[in-house]
Amino acid sequence: MPGVTRKQIEQAKEWDLLSYLRAYEPRELKKCGNEYCMVSHDSLKISNGKWHWHSQGIGGKTALDYLIKVRGMDFVGAVEALCGMGSGMEPNAAAERITPERQPREFSLPEPNRYGTAMVSYLQGRGVDADIISRCIGLGILYEGRRYHNCVFIGRDREGKARYACIRGIGGRYRGEVEGSNKRYGFCLPSRACGCFSVTVAESPIDVLSVASVRKIQGEDWEADNYLSLGGTAPCALLQFLEDHPAIERITLCLDNDKAGIRGMEKIHEAILESPGLSRRTLDIIDSPPPVSCGKDYNDLLQKRMAGEPGRGDVPWQL
């Protein structure tokens, strides 16, 4: 890494976030029950040597992680600042090395294209059912962006306000989120059934639509369930959904069948157990990653089903 040595990197990583905040930003630190949180980011919790910013779905172990992921510093600058703090420099002088936190831009949805032809063609090419695509468009949670003709998947809060947007390129492998997105409000395809007590959870919006599509192919009532995308593996969108929908009793976790997805399901179980409110609720949580033989995720499984494989009996999560 140009500009810093391996020794400097190791020295910088010795700073845990709690020690850093106590020494250089004590006004930002407050006790929250058995853990600590920050004044300016009250959903950023510090516990057991780790920190997690729940509203943004990011976390880490060290102050170096914090300076890069939260404060927006570049790696070299963050390492140099922390090394200065560990060299006996006066606290005020050392703190001046820290770049002021970059304020995120205000959340604003990309301009929609008049027609969604390219988007619909792309999603159908991935095997997603046309009726499911049409329902998403009708609900105003999916459209084609005007500038790049990407798929734009929208997450709304309980009042229906757009708070999050995930973008999927149709001409390449681009994936991203609109700046200022709040990861607590993931893309959600709601149930048509009144008093629905269940939610199916996947990592990406396309995986969410893929689960619904496979259920439709199998003759199941796919509209009887809620579908939620986490926008990754962090549990914050599900925790918010459960808070907003207290009637939910069953959660089906359809995360990817890889190391990140399996660990993501474990983290969801842990987060629910650690939540004072959710731990008191009776929740039936079912881990249902796709079978290894069907690929990594549910879109892989869907495309194999569209091609005539695997057989119906090979799908273990069928409800």
Image (cartoon, rainbow, N blue to C red):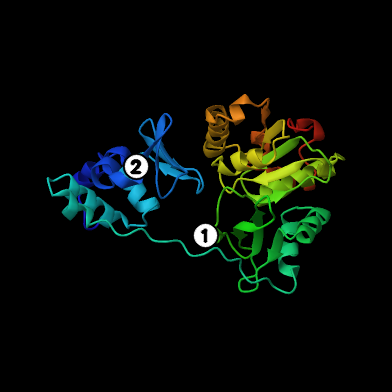
- Amino acid type at circle 2 is Leu
Q: Which residue is mark 1?
A: 180
How crowded pointer 1 is (Cα within 10 Å; few <14, some 14-19, many 20+) is rated as some
Locate residue 280: give its quadrant.
top right
Q: Position of residue 218 (x, y in %)?
A: 84, 40
Q: Return the x and y of residue 81 as percentages of the image width and height.
A: 22, 53
Q: Residue 92 versus residue 151: which sits nearer the camera?
A: 92
Label 1 vs 2, first from the N-terminus: 2
Q: Residue furthest right?
A: 219
Q: Secondary structure at mark 2?
A: strand
Q: Where does the C terminus fall, quadrant-wise? A: top right
Q: Nearer the viewer, mark 1 or mark 2?
A: 2
Can see residue 7? Answer: yes
Q: CA distance from mark 1 to mark 2?
A: 24 Å
Q: Residue furthest left?
A: 88
- Residue under the point 31% across and 46% down: 27
| Quadrant in the picture for residue 125 | bottom right
Foreground pick, 105 / 150? 105
Numbered badge on residue 29: 2
Q: Which of these two is toward me, 27 or 96?
A: 27
Q: Amino acid at mark 1?
A: Gly
Quadrant holding the N terminus? bottom left
Q: Position of residue 85 (x, y in %)?
A: 19, 47
Relative horizontal placement of residue 38, taking residue 126 as reference (left or right) = left
Name the side, left or right, on which 162 lies relative to 81: right
Q: Position of residue 28 (x, y in %)?
A: 34, 46
